Amino acid sequence: MVKEQGAEHRILEAARRVFIRKGMAGARMQEVADEAGINKALLHYYYRDKQRLFEGVFKGSAERQFTCIWRVLEECDDLFEGIERFVATYLDRMLEEPLLPQFLISELNRDPKHLLEFIDRGKAGRAHYQKLFEQAREEGRIIDIDPRELLVNIMALCAHPFIARPMLTHLHGMNDEAFRRMILKRRRTVPDFIIRSIRA
C-alpha cells in the first residue's frame, strides 16, 4: 500500500477531535477513519490500534506541556510571579489539550522511562525555580517548607480538576462551558491560595 500524501496529518487531527469528543474509552477506529475521510485499512496502516493512535496524538502535546511550563519559570525573577505564571500556563495548556492528563497517567503506568525523558528537559526551569525559592526563603518572605512539597501542591491543584473532570462535572452539574469558566477562575485563585499558604 502506498502512503497517501497528507493522510497521517489528517488522521492525527481527526483522532484528536474524536478523542476530545468521546475520550479514549469511547473513541472507535472506524469513527476516526470516517472523520479523516479515509478507509479503515489506511488508518491501520499508520496506526495498528487505538492505543498507538492515542500516543501519536498526545505524545507531542506532552512534550510541549513540559517544555512551556518550565520555560515560563526561567523568565521570572520572583517566586510569587513564577507561581502565578506557572499555574496560568499549566491550566491554559490543559484547556487546550483536555485529554493530556489521561495520556500522561497512561504513559506513567505503561512506560515511565520514556515520559521521564520529556520531564528531564525541564531541568533548567526546575533549577531556576529552586533559585527563586531559595532567594524568597533567604529574604524571609516564605515559611519553612520543602520546595519539592510546594511544587507537588501546585501541580496537584492544577491537574486534579482535569483528572477528576467526569466526577466534578457530575457532582456539580457542570457542562463544558461551566468547567472552562471554573478553570479560568483557578488561574487566579490557585496562585492566591498557594502564595497565602507560604507567605511568612
Image (cartoon, rainbow, N blue to C red):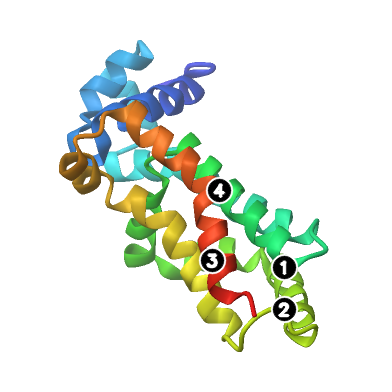
**Residue linked to disc 4:** 188
Q: Secondary structure at mark 3?
A: helix
Q: Earlier in the sequence, mark 3 or mark 4?
A: 4
Amino acid carrying label 3: it is Ile
Q: Quadrant of the C terminus?
A: bottom right
Of label 3 and label 1, which has the lower sequence position? Answer: 1
Task: Return the x and y of residue 66 as percentages of the image width and height.
Answer: 59, 56
Residue in view at x 30 percent, y 45 percent: 51
Of marks 1 and 4, the one in the foreground = 4
Which labelled disc corresponds to residue 141? 2
> In whole angstroms, how far apart are the C-alphas of marks 4 and 2?
20 Å
Under mark 4, the amino acid is: Arg
Q: Of the two numbered discs 3 and 2 on the same chain, state the one appearing first in sequence.
A: 2
Is residue 91 visible in the rendered structure shown here? Answer: yes
Q: Read off the residue under disc 1.
A: 79
Residue 179: quadrant of the picture: top left
Q: Is residue 61 left or right of residue 109?
A: right
Q: Does the image show residue 102?
A: no
Q: How far apart in space, not on screen, are marks 1 and 4 (Cα)?
A: 16 Å
**Label 4 or label 2, whichever comes before in sequence order:** 2
In the figure, is residue 169 to the left or right of 130?
A: left
Quick one: SS at disc 2? loop
Secondary structure at badge 1 equals: helix
Dividing the image into 4 quarters, which one contains the N terminus?
Answer: top left
Q: Amino acid at mark 1?
A: Leu
Q: Amino acid at mark 2?
A: Arg
Residue 94 image offset from top left, x and y in percent: 47, 43
Question: Percent from the top left, x then y, of residue 123?
Answer: 69, 70
| CA gap, disc 3 and disc 1 | 11 Å
Cα distance in 3D space between marks 2 and 1: 10 Å
Few, some or many C-alpha atoms within 10 Å of disc 4 (few <14, some 14-19, many ≥20)?
some
